[in-house]
Amino acid sequence: MSKRCAIYPGTFDPFTLGHLDIVERACRIFDEVIITIATNARKKPLFSVEERIDLIHDAVRRFPSVRAESFGGLLVDFARQKSAVAIIRGLRAISDFEFEFQMALMNRRLQKDITTVFLMPNEKYTYLNSTIVKEVAEFGGDISNFVTPEVARRLRDKFK
């Protein structure tokens, strides 16, 4: 029986406990999860792709079936290359749904054999996003409840 692989795409700048919660949920459903860092020329990330991959690897150490990679181009092409059966998307609030729904329909149109699976994080992470975490860190706020200790350390280093 072949392994059921899912792709969890995002910018992950930085990887938060909300992202980790989605990974944990995805691991209960799929045999393998590939966290994929999308390179987007319109976004100016704080961390390089390599730094983000390192931070993700640190955060997911306890999940042997999870790895992190980066990709450029169409997500469905990357998913097909990895023989993925699904794309994982986290939904925090109803405001996320419209955009995510449109993307899911477009991805289905481009590759009908790959299903988008929406996962909701634990309620304590529904307000959390990377932009908010960076802003709190930039102004010296306590981010220890939002990210792993390594991400917190690296954010403090960035904003010294």
Image (cartoon, helix red, strand yellow):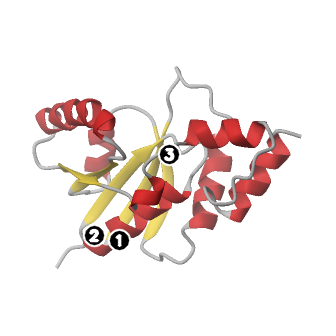
Quadrant (top left, top right, bottom left, bottom right) of the N terminus: bottom left
Q: Is residue 130 left or right of residue 126?
A: right
Of badges 3 and 1, nearer the viewer stands 1
Q: CA distance from mark 3 to mark 1?
A: 19 Å
Please state which of residues 61 and 25 is positioned toward the viewer in this rendering.
25
- Residue at 65% x, 57% y: name it: 54
Q: Quadrant of residue 111?
A: top left
Q: Badge 3: few (under 14), some or many (20 or more) residues near its Cα, within 10 Å?
A: some
Q: Are marks 2 and 3 in contact (CB under 8 Å)?
A: no
Extreme residue toward the right, this view: 160
| Camera-nearest residue between 76 and 147 | 147
Q: Would you place residue 90 above or below residue 1 in this image?
A: above
Per the rendering, the mark at residue 30 is 2
Q: Which residue is mark 3?
A: 70
Horizontal side of 25 relative to 53 (left or right) equals: left
Q: Earlier in the sequence, mark 3 or mark 1?
A: 1
* 22 is higher (above) or lower (below) than 15: below
Amino acid on which disc 3 is placed: Ser
Name the quadrant of the C terminus: top right
Horizontal side of residue 40 vs 132, given as left or right = left
What's the mark number on residue 88? none
Residues marked 2 and 1 touching at CB (< 8 Å)? yes
Mark 1: amino acid: Cys
Tag 3's secondary structure? strand
Whole-percent x, y for residue 149 in the image:
71, 64
* Residue at point 73%, 55% (across, down): 152
Q: Whole-percent x and y of residue 94?
A: 28, 38
Label at residue 27: 1
| Helix, strand or loop at mark 1 | helix
Mark-to-mark CA distance, 2 and 1:
5 Å
